[in-house]
């Protein structure tokens, strides 16, 4: 099971090809696309492209399931599969590192900040706050929105599905919809 495109890249770098009979589950479409580019056949992409969604959609299996993930990934997948009695090899495939400790100072407040993961939310909260009250905070999905709120940031836009396209569509729609107390531009 791969939980991100980065996990696919790390594994594909180390394993030239998968052994016959190995089945691949990907948490979402972007991860599945990365797996296919690596030459892997993808057997499962859950309709609910989240950690909980892949646990719910995962079939009962005999044998081990390798879960390749980031060092900071929540244990939702591993704990969920183990709770179902599935034998899991939990592998830290890569480490997520910040980009520095200095506050990010911008000459002009951004119109929007795109939040694509809980770790991005925490970095924004740590290095970019306080955000200008006019800056929209747009999250890639409901799970990321919850983590963004937990990091102390406002959430203005939530993409209905976890993809870059959905995030951008939701942001554009939000930016083109005037608040109730303001008239639309002519």
Image (tube, helix red, strand yellow):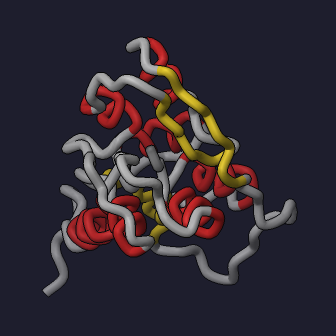
Question: Which residue is nearer to you in this view: 52 or 172?
Answer: 52
Q: Position of residue 52 (x, y in %)?
A: 36, 30
Q: Quadrant of the N terminus?
A: top left
Callout count: 0
Side of 108 relative to 66 (left or right): right
Q: In this picture, is 53 found above or below 12? A: above
The answer to which of 75 and 58 lies nearer the viewer is: 58
Q: Residue at x 38, y 55 (%)?
A: 140
Judged from this view, the residue extending furthest toward the bottom is: 186
- Between 184 and 71, the one lying in front of the other is 71
Q: Position of residue 110 (x, y in %)?
A: 53, 74
| Position above or below: 39 against 42 | below
Residue at point 48% right, 55% down? 4
Above or below 76: residue 114: below
Residue 134 in view, yes or no: no
Q: Which residue is found at the position 26% from the left and 50% from the top?
A: 43
Q: Which quarter of the figure is the C terminus placed in?
A: bottom left
Corner quadrant of residue 151: top right
Is 42 placed above or below 122 here? below
Residue at 19 percent of width and 44 percent of height: 47
The answer to whether residue 148 is visible is yes
Q: Where does residue 38 sit, x and y in percent of width and height? A: 44, 71
Q: Furthest-front residue in view?
A: 20
Please provide percent x and percent y for residue 84. Answer: 38, 14
Asked which quadrant contains residue 145, the reply is: top left
């Amino acid at each position: 099971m791969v939980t991100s495109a980065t996990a696919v890249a790390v594994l594909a770098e180390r394993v030239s090809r998968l052994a016959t009979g190995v089945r691949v589950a990907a948490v979402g479409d972007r991860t599945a696309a990365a797996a296919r580019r690596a030459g892997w056949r993808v057997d499962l992409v859950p309709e609910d492209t989240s950690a909980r969604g892949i646990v719910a959609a995962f079939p009962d299996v005999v044998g081990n399931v390798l879960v390749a993930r980031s060092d900071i990934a929540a244990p939702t997948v591993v704990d969920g599969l183990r709770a179902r009695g599935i034998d899991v090899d939990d592998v830290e495939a890569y480490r997520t590192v910040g980009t520095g400790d200095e506050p990010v100072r911008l000459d002009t407040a951004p119109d929007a900040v795109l939040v694509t993961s809980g770790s991005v939310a925490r970095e924004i909260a740590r290095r970019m706050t306080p955000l200008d009250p006019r800056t929209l905070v747009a999250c890639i999905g409901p799970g990321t929105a919850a983590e963004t709120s937990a990091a102390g940031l406002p959430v203005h836009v939530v993409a209905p599905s976890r993809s870059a396209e959905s995030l951008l569509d939701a942001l554009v729609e939000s930016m083109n919809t005037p608040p109730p107390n303001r008239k639309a531009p002519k």
